[in-house]
Amino acid sequence: MNPDEKHNKPVKAPRIADAQKVTVDRATREMIGRAQELGVETVFDRAENMKPCKIGVQGTCCKICGMGPCRLPQSKIDPDGTDNRKGLCGATANTIAARNFARMVAGGVAAHSDHGRNVAEIFLSAALKETDHYTIKDPIKLISIAGYLNVDTTVTVDGEIRDRDIDEIAIQVGEAALNEWGKVNGELLYLKRAPAPLYEKWKANGVLPRNIDREIVDIMHRTHMGVDQDYVNITKQCSRAALADGWGGSMLATDLQDVLFGTPFPLATEANLGIMKKDHVNIIVHGHEPALSEMIVAVSQSEKMLKYALQKGAKGIQLGGICCTANEVLQRHGVPAAGGFLQQELAIITGACDAMVVDVQCIFQNLANVAKCFHTKLITTNPMAKIEQDNVLHIEFDEHYAMQDAERIVKAAVDNFQNRGTEVMIPDQKATQIAGFSVEAVEYHLGGTFRGSFYTLNDNIINGRIRGIAGLVGCNNARTKHNENHLTVIKELIKNDVIVLSTGCNAIACAMAGLLTPESAAAYCGPGLAEVCETVGIPPVLHMGSCVDNSRLLLAASKVVEAGGLGTDISDLPLAGSAPEWMSEKAISIGHYFVSSGVYTVFGYGIPTSGAPVFHDHLGAGMEKLYGGMWDIVTDPIEHARRMIAHINKKRKALGIDKARERVLVGMSDRQALGA
Ligand code: MSK
């Protein structure tokens, strides 16, 4: 130990994580051990040495002006409940926490929606034929979304209705979509995709988003020092901005990506660090945007590049993904996922990662420090996401030269293969997964091409074989045991016949634990859900994509309402949302658009609002009165799942479907009668 000269105290050596305690995943445990053996620090170790600020986690630290930070601990509330806490300007705990929460919503909406804008720009560029690297891969989906954007798909010539040219439709769809970010008048066009009663609720509550960018700017303005000082009014704007994400930026991103890169349909692939191969060039794509990684998939499978890899002594090129870029290329091409958010450093620590290619969001700055200890080339590709360190290579992605950019990146990885050291250690754990359940794929599975619909799902919910639906989303968080909450909550839900729709790192956690296979139904599900999964041939947990693809969950819920028999609004459904291990501002935006769309939503790690109990309650009971959905926080994963099940049971009772009944064939008129 070195003496700390100033205080004359011994300096403690940094603590290291206990691998058994911080993750349930065997590959992750092995790699944490390997990192510690090599003296390479990871997020798991850093979490041991830095604890979160107690007032920060309560949400009552205000640092929006130069007189602060003003810190209002919950302990200063009088024992009789009187709350006289205030900042220098007089801002109350409720105002401060609501402003902080709103800024998190704005950050999340901005991240999802700026991604969406980028997709829309590439889409329009492809439609205008400014680039020949991207083409329309799913014209059927293009036609299906055109109407929502007020683009005609037919034209009348000499009194005869004809199909319009697909390229013309694509240009108008691209222009109309881009217009949603900054239009001057009106409201977002996709809001009409929600059930009519929900749209009317939004209208009555004054939260119809005007355009995507404006709602983000509005939050930044109203949370500036001395503007909005009413937590209810601030929360209202949170809803307007979050809806601009879920039913705007994210939904447009998902749709345009599907049209451009293909709508996902189920395919088999694998997950976990064991997908990396010792004798192959390993390239890991990480972040959120599929535009470049689509090209990397094409280049790494090209005969030219495979030959080049052979010349360099490798047996082939193994592509893998981390976080949501993983989910994007996984659901469309079957590229395996190497891991989720907390495993990013570990992929490099295998010593077998020849290049890690990052775009935006969820990228640790410490990747550069880890890469320095190995031969890995860390390549940034987005002009807004550089890493200030000399071992990081920046190859800027330009959609007009997409293929050339991808070739440079893949070539750099192949060239780097020969620089590998001897310290390669790849854990052997990997699991099979079936992913790629877009809304269209679920419809097809339930009814085939002739009668694709959600009727079968509704019938099984009405008959009680399926108790209800859960949407499980979100990240990993180094403050909770890696994947434990995800897996415990999900196992408890499916054991109780609740079918799960999953996205993001939650889906990766499920994949790694083998929950994304049809066979897992027999092992983990209650008898009703197991029977349905076996009959239809689906897993009990359906992987629906990346973070922006949470919009698929909103559309799936709307389709269930439309199919009939389960009420008239999303808030009527036996449905609950959950983010067991959230960490990102995007998760806060997702949570808030779920709640504002009528979904009871439980987070497994506290949100920073507990220091302002009145505002915190408003996010719960207050939101439920307005929209039918509410926030809830439950850290124990079994209790978390039980609360969701209790909510589902409550909704079943309200619908009159809580009693076991014989299976009957429900006709259209029966459904309408039930929904009335
Ligand atoms: S990557 S936002 S850790 S889900 Fe979408 Fe995972 Fe959360 Fe990032």
Image (tube, rainbow, N blue to C red):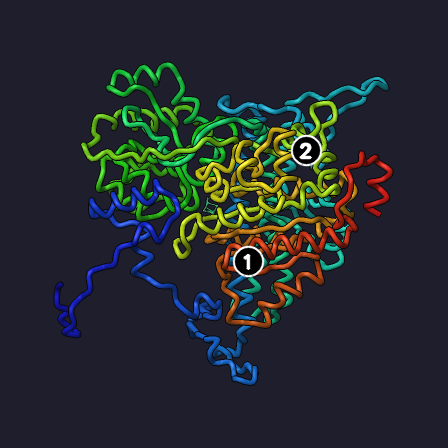
Residue 240 appears in the rendering: no
Comparing labels 1 and 2, the label whose residue is closer to the camera: 1
Residue ID at (48%, 75%): 74
- Residue that badge 2 annotates: 145
Q: Is residue 633 above or below residue 514?
A: below
Cα distance between the residues tagged 1 and 2: 40 Å
Q: Which structural element holds mark 2?
A: helix
The local crowd at label 2, few if under 14, some if 14 to 19, many if 20 or more residues have their Cα within 10 Å, is some
- Residue that badge 1 annotates: 639
The local crowd at label 1, few if under 14, some if 14 to 19, many if 20 or more residues have their Cα within 10 Å, is some
Left or right side of 201 for 497? left
- Residue 374 vs residue 152, the one in the foreground: 374
Q: Is residue 576 above or below residue 466?
A: below
Disc ID at residue 142: none
Left or right side of 258 for 327? left
First along the sequence among labels 1 and 2: 2
Looking at the picture, which amino acid does disc 1 mark?
Glu
User: What x and y, as percent, mark residue 112?
Assistant: 53, 45
User: What x and y, as percent, mark residue 271?
Assistant: 42, 34
User: What x and y, as percent, mark residue 501?
Assistant: 59, 41
Left or right side of 155 for 353? left
Residue ID at (43%, 25%): 297
Mark 2 Cβ and ligand 1 under 8 Å apart: no
Residue ID at (74%, 50%): 658
